[in-house]
Image: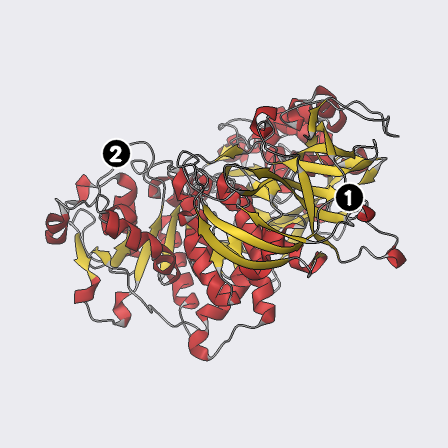
Amino acid sequence: MAFIGDYRPGKPNNSTPRIHHDNLLDDPAYRTKVGFDLVSAHMRRLPEIPADGVSVCAACSAIKLDDIDTEEGYRHSESYHALSASSMRGCPLCLMFFQILHSHSGIGDPNQALVILNPHITGRPIHLRAIRDDQSGKIRTINVRIESWPLSSKQAGLRIFALPGTAAARRGFQLGVPFGESEKWAAMKAWLARETAGPNFRGTRQLPTRLIDVGKAADNCNLGVRLVETSSLPLRSDLDYAALSYRWGATNTVTTIQSNLKAHVDGIILEQLPRTIRDAVHATRRLGLKYLWVDCLCIVQDDRDDWAREAARMGDVYMNAHCTLATHSAQHADDGFLEESMGREKVVAAGGHPGSEPFGDELAAYNTFAQLDPEKIATEVTSNMSTSETLFFSKGSYARHHLDRSELSSRGWVLQERVLSPRVIHFGPRGSIYFETRAGVEHIETGVEANYHPFPGLTRALEKLDLEHLGATVNSETAELAYNGWYEVLMRYSACSLSKAQDRLIAVSGVAQKMEKLTGDTFVDGLWMKTFHFCLLWLSQDGALMPNVFIQAPTWSWTSVEGKVQHPHGTLMLSIASILPELQLAGIKKQSPPDKNVSRRGSVLQLDNVVKINTHLRFLEGRIGLPWWDNTVLHIGLEHETRYWDVYADDGRHLGWASLDFERRAALDGLAEAITCIKVASNNDDRPENGWDRGYMVLFIAYSADLCAWRRVGMGQILDRKRFDMDPVGILLA
């Protein structure tokens, strides 16, 4: 039997004791090392801008046009920690700068914190520099960066406004205030018109089974709607529809069931619908569309056959939608989203030195640099402003936080909806709205979001399907984009929650269907047959996997567990990793174990030319982190930390590391035979001339008498290639 516990045969060169913590942030030594406690409030959440009447700090009040509009920019803070401390003391503008600095850095991720909080970086000054629009020459955004560290440059994010007739306006700062409701509706319609114009737009290719007829744009918002069977409608250009992406929440919502299906076809009183759906009806009308798809109304919820049929078509519903309405500002169906998203964003005034502006008493409150209501700027400021250098700052574009970290994005079904939708309007919090296409994310006012594309590989591949009508074809390059994109989608999808754990595979089946078309591959229980080597090598993102008792999945599949998974090398798996061609997938068959009480059933892999390790294995529990040994990084491109175990041979030699699927020792007890491992892949650059030899990526397995087959226990890395010298065999992996 493999020994699992505190056994360490022989003393390794690196004798640093391993401290067991469920999360690095629970380790006091780690928190001290990276200065986490100093910025914990910002890392855990992004606070609101303080209430009206809170003054900005001296550094913000001293911002000058001559400094900010230069190549070097305005030296605002002496260090990252100085900026953090000022934002914690309540300066609303420093808080904005702090948030923008981290808008793309993943500061809440302990992996990134090790880099972001490096004293060689955080001890450098913080600079602010105005960025001019390439076409108009206007200054619309501000760059917040750490000196001499280009990775911190965030050119899109914090927006700047100036009042008409001021020195700031003459300098080229954009005029006006953040969009109000009428400007936002106009911008949304203009964006949709632009994105659906030209030969690249094919229009609706396939209608869902049912749609909600919301009437015409001129109809009163309180007018009722009705459910329509699309089979009775001719396929015309004016049948374009919007699809709703939202959270049901814990509250009971109105649904279509068999007993009220006919009544819903006759008509639905709008006031009886949850507020989020009412808002979606209003938005659909304002965008000039007549039809809306909402799952709770367009799928018969108590008809198993209808639900299964429509769930299988979910990917097509969103991929063929004219646009998708994503409601990040609504926590559940009763919340509504328009009131939160359609208001103007707040602004903060700063610059020009306190008391030096010729505004007199009328702007006295603003000269304390309080948070402003943009509506008041144009109506209350009437004094001579010709020499004013005051600027108005708005948080504006902050897509990574507003979209990726919203409650909506934590829902498993929503990720598929977002990936497949060719056009999405994201209704975010505090007046923020974003547009998303295959090309990336765009703020409604500032334009393209710099350095932010949520699914670059897969969406580029999906463009081929969007352009099929123009003769676009898929090829090997498209397939590689799709495969690499799949690992990114899976990593994010596995971190999402599902109301029903048994939906773990169904809720991403729409993406899998498009992947099959892009790659010509076959999807079986979460595995792609042509690239099965890589698909077997999943592991935990945080060491917290649990068996998925609600689904009968094989142990080799990520669907057999609940929790966040990742793959070595992440989205570059196919580019960096190298399969071992001798390991062959001879076939896949469905098999049930002889004992009817055993829950693990499903697809069994028939693997040929399997080479096992030639020694018994011993395991010493490690901790959450990236595997290290003798100050050498042994990990293979892991994007997130994992709980790893050190692996030894029975002669006491250290072999590598293992990430076991279930960390509890009890989960590994009762295995009929010793745990062993088989080699699966290696690294492309593991050649002697490169000075690298990181061994093999391996799968840890153990034999199960109940299954009459081998079962997966985990994956990891064995450095000593000479340990794999046994004769190849064939095995069944269940």
| Residue 398 visible, this angle | no
- Crowdedness of circle 1 by 10 Å Cα count: few (<14), some, many (20+)? many
Image location of residue 454, percent across then percent down:
55, 52
User: Which residue type carries mark 2?
Assistant: Asn
What residue is shown at x 23% (from left), y 57% (from top)? 210
Residue in front for this viewpoint, 280 or 191: 280
Q: CA distance from mark 2 to mark 1?
A: 52 Å
Q: Which residue is mark 1?
A: 147
Tell me the element at label 1: loop
Residue at 52% across, 36% down: 563
Residue 415's disc number: none
Q: Is residue 400 left or right of residue 128?
A: left
Q: Is residue 374 above or below residue 250?
A: below
Q: In the rendered image, which quarter is residue 314 located in?
A: bottom left
Mark in front: 2 vs 1: 2
Residue identifier under label 2: 252
The answer to which of 245 and 258 lies nearer the viewer is: 258
Q: Hey, what amino acid is under mark 1?
A: Glu
Q: Residue furthest top?
A: 28
The one of 243 and 192 positioned closer to us in this rendering: 243
